[in-house]
Amino acid sequence: MIKCLIIDDEPLAIELLESHLKKIESLQLVGTARNAMEAHKLLQQQQVDLLFLDIQMPHLSGIELMRSLSVKPKVIFTTAFREFAIEGFELEAVDYILKPITFERFFRAVDRVLRTHTPNNIEHTIMIKSDGLNRKIKTDDIIFIESQGNDLKIYLNDTTYLTKGTLIDFTDLLSKMGFVRIHRSFLFNPTYVTGYSTSEIILGPYAIPVGRNYKQEFDAFMAHYSKTTL
């Protein structure tokens, strides 16, 4: 588990990062701070592996805070300004993200940390909210995900869940685990493929259409799938 601390003087920015963090099971939020002084106190009280650190803050900037630390956690700088990028990377930042921060961009940044902390045999899970409950789902149990407007329908072996979100929220994350997208509305787990044609993929009782703009992705999948099923 990677222990994370968010440091930002904007409440909405903290709220957005908290939302992104909750979608990744391997990240644990241990606190938030509105300025560098609060952050410094929290860093003395507990172990922190990763900082999400705003640069422009009152009294002491994020860059000045990092320079003041004798023991430096990994850091992802979050800012609305490009001009501090060089200074940020001079401090060996994992990444430098410009606001507003999408989940796709957030995940690309934390993936660099996840790859160094996550054992190969870890059981991958995601967290979703469905029917008023926060639910932990094993990614191996997901057959496919279907986009339905502002909702996502997640098909599992024995049930389905409906949750708010867009397919892009999960595409970057699950593609790292082998999931494939060959249609704008569907993301599927190749483990469950039982048949295919040039126009659709069969997943047991389900059929996933091949999108006309996803021919390259479909061809790449079929080339790999054919080799693994010989």
Image: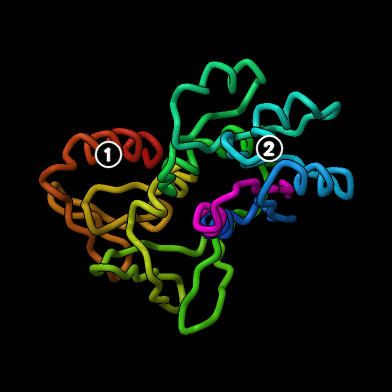
State the separation of the CA atoms marked 1 and 2.
56 Å
Q: Position of residue 134 (x, y in %)?
A: 56, 75
Residue type at tag 2: His
Q: Residue at x 44, y 26 (%)?
A: 82
The residue at 59%/18% (across/down) is 87
Span colored in magenta: 1-17
Say what secondary structure mark 1 lies in: helix
Q: Amino acid at mark 1?
A: Met
Residue at 23% from the left image edge and 41% from the top image edge: 218
* Residue farthest right in this picture: 45
Pick the front one: 16 or 58: 58
Q: Is residue 58 left or right of residue 13?
A: right
Residue 50 as seen in the image, left or right of residue 210: right
Residue 10, magenta (yes or no): yes
Q: What is the crowding at mark 1: few (fewer than 14 residues within 10 Å), some, or many (at least 20)?
A: some
**Can you name the residue that lies furthest to the left here?**
212
Q: Which mark is residue 105?
A: none
Is residue 215 rendered to the left or right of residue 230? left
Q: Which mark is residue 59?
A: 2
User: Which residue extends farthest front?
Assistant: 59
Q: Up-down: is 127 above or below 133?
A: above
Measured as percent of width and height from the top left, residue 142 is found at: 45, 63
Residue on which disc 1 sits: 222
Residue appearing at x 41%, y 47% in the figure: 102
Q: Residues within 10 Å of mark 2 (few under 14, many from 20)?
A: few
Q: Between residue 43 and residue 206, name the one nearer to us.
A: 43
